[in-house]
């Protein structure tokens, strides 16, 4: 089973029933697209959206897009017809909404495995990311993150949306009410070797608010976040990309320790701080992350 993926700063939702939006999505320069068959598609258009998304997937992949699809949930399971239609060569993974707990995520993983088999794809080649939108799934976030097919978990806190309703908190722009939940998601994901994903800032035109919220998510340890509109992508990408100044700082740290080691020392003062090999490991991680987005 695939359990890791190249870091993704921005996942952009694209309504699966709007061909014009699907055609324009590549221009947003998001790291990955989520072709949405769920909440952004009216019930009467679900079948047509499924067919449209299935048809557009090869075209988008040929354009170099990383493709994910959010599928619907039916009365008792996730929509198998959705999954069978969109599990195609090159599709990176499936998003699922509102799992009750690990049981639902295991079920979705088995359904994806069936779709992989029917499509003659290697088992485990399609990833899975659950949106933790029920209180029980948030409480059991580590158990969910440990499931082999899961490559990331989402701790998103859109205003007046599913998570707020589940936890009964009162949303604020500062986010103190959801900080504990987000930190749990980060810790669970990191402990399982998966990616923690944040968001969602639904005040589309408030890019200053988005910048503050995404910076706070990054500070907590998130690796990226969900975007609702193309105009949000640039802010999110910038937030989650180490700056040139950060890269220069950490490269200087590496150089300083290497010079100290040549003189037989295991630590050194750098920019007023005591550093040793542990700090340089962090420095190398930051530089590697920056290089991965070039």
Image (spheres, helix red, strand yellow):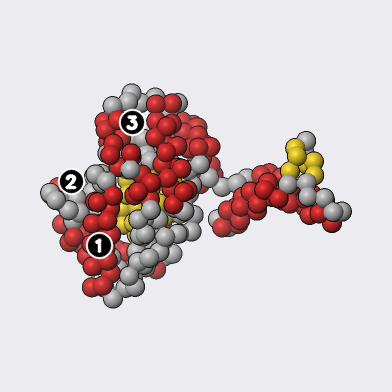
Residue at 56% x, 47% y is: 241
Residue at 38% x, 41% y is: 155
Alpha-carbon distance for marks 3 and 1?
A: 32 Å
Q: Earlier in the sequence, mark 3 or mark 1?
A: 1
Q: Earlier in the sequence, mark 3 or mark 2?
A: 2
SS at circle 1: helix
> Mark 3 or mark 1, which is nearer to you?
1
Q: Residues within 10 Å of mark 3 (few under 14, many from 20)?
A: some
Q: Earlier in the sequence, mark 1 or mark 2?
A: 2
Alpha-carbon distance for marks 1 and 2?
A: 27 Å
Q: Position of residue 258 (x, y in %)?
A: 78, 54
Q: Position of residue 232 (x, y in %)?
A: 44, 42
SS at circle 3: loop
SS at circle 2: loop
Q: Position of residue 256 (x, y in %)?
A: 79, 49
The residue labelled by disc 1 is: 110
Which sits in the foreground, 228 or 257? 257
Q: Residues within 10 Å of mark 2 (few under 14, many from 20)?
A: few
The residue labelled by disc 3 is: 159
> Mark 3 or mark 2, which is nearer to you?
3
224 vs 228, left or right, is right
Residue at 78% x, 35% y is: 272
Alpha-carbon distance for marks 3 and 2?
A: 21 Å
Q: Quadrant of the C terminus?
A: bottom right
- The dot on residue 42 is 2
């Amino acid at each position: 089973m695939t359990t890791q993926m190249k870091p993704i700063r921005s996942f952009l939702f694209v309504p699966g029933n709007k061909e014009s939006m699907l055609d324009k999505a590549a221009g947003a320069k998001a790291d990955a697209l989520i072709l949405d068959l769920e909440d952004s598609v009216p019930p009467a258009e679900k079948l047509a959206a499924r067919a449209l998304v299935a048809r557009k997937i090869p075209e988008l992949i040929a354009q170099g897009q990383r493709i994910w699809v959010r599928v619907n949930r039916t009365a008792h399971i996730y929509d198998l017809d959705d999954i069978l239609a969109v599990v195609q060569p090159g599709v990176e993974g499936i998003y699922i909404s509102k799992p009750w707990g690990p049981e639902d995520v295991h079920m979705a993983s088995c359904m994806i495995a069936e779709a992989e088999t029917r499509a003659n794809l290697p088992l485990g080649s399609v990833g899975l990311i659950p949106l933790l939108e029920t209180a029980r799934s948030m409480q059991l976030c580590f158990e969910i993150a440990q499931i082999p097919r899961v490559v990331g978990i989402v701790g998103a806190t859109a205003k007046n949306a599913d998570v707020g309703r589940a936890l009964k908190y009162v949303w604020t722009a500062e986010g103190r009410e959801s900080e504990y939940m987000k930190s749990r998601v980060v810790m669970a994901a990191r402990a399982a070797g998966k990616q923690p994903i944040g968001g969602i800032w639904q005040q589309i035109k408030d890019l200053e608010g988005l910048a503050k919220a995404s910076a706070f998510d990054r500070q907590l340890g998130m690796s990226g976040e969900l975007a609702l509109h193309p105009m949000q992508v640039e802010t999110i990408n910038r937030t989650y990309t180490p700056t040139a100044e950060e890269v220069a700082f950490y490269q200087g740290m590496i150089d300083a320790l290497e010079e100290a080691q040549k003189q037989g020392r295991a630590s050194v003062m750098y920019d007023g701080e005591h550093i040793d090999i542990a700090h340089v490991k962090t420095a190398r991680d930051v530089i590697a992350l920056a290089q991965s987005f070039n």
